Image (cartoon, rainbow, N blue to C red):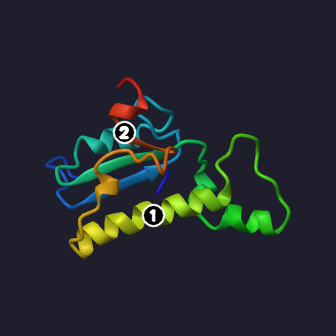
Amino acid sequence: MDGTTYARIPKNGFSRPFLFLGSPQHVPGGRDTSWERDWKLLTGWKRWLVLSGAEHQSFTDGPLMAGALGIRPASGVLPAARAAELTRTYVAAFLDLHLKSKRQPLLDEPSSRYPEVRFCPAACGPR
């Protein structure tokens, strides 16, 4: 979730299921190019999801704790509770699909219930 991928994928690819879940800096042509580099080497099931309004810390308990301490997020940042809900929902769907073999339509296409989630690379702009 979010962050640069430092461990290099072998040139012959990686065939295990893989989920990228991140902030808007992780879009094709974005500031962090590691996901775009590695996407091409993922040969198995894969999804690249970007949460509009998310920041690097949105995928941790930090924003939830900050709210409890009275620290307000910057304007335009995805609310902490919503970021946690989205993270839990999509990670659970990924695990249910690949560990329990339960079909997960949520991972097939964008959902009107979760409009903050964009499927990349196609829905994230030009490559």
What's the CA distance linking mark 1 and mark 2? 18 Å
* Amino acid of disc 2: Cys
Dividing the picture into quarters, in which one does residue 39 lie? Answer: top left
Residue 28 relative to residue 101: left or right: right
Dividing the picture into quarters, in which one does residue 33 lie? Answer: top left
In this view, which residue lies farthest toward the front?
112
In this view, which residue lies farthest toward the right?
70
Q: Position of residue 54 (x, y in %)?
A: 59, 47
Give the residue displayed 64% in from the left and 68% down from the top: 61
Give the residue displayed 41% in from the left and 64% down from the top: 91
Q: Residues within 10 Å of mark 2 (few under 14, many from 20)?
A: some
Observer-nearest of 38 and 86: 86
Give the residue displayed 78% in from the left and 63% down from the top: 67
Q: Residues within 10 Å of mark 1 (few under 14, many from 20)?
A: few
Give the label, 1 or 2, closer to the camera. 1
Q: Which residue is mark 1?
A: 89
Q: Position of residue 60 (x, y in %)?
A: 59, 64
Q: Which residue is mark 2?
A: 120
* Amino acid of disc 1: Thr
Q: Position of residue 7 (x, y in %)?
A: 35, 56
**Is the residue under label 2 in contact with that under label 1 (CB below 8 Å)?**
no
Observer-nearest of 88 and 109: 109
Please say if 24 is above or below 82.
Answer: above
Q: Position of residue 32 (x, y in %)?
A: 47, 39
The kind of secondary structure element at disc 2 is: strand
Residue 24 relative to residue 33: left or right: right
Sequence-wise, the earlier of marks 1 and 2 is 1
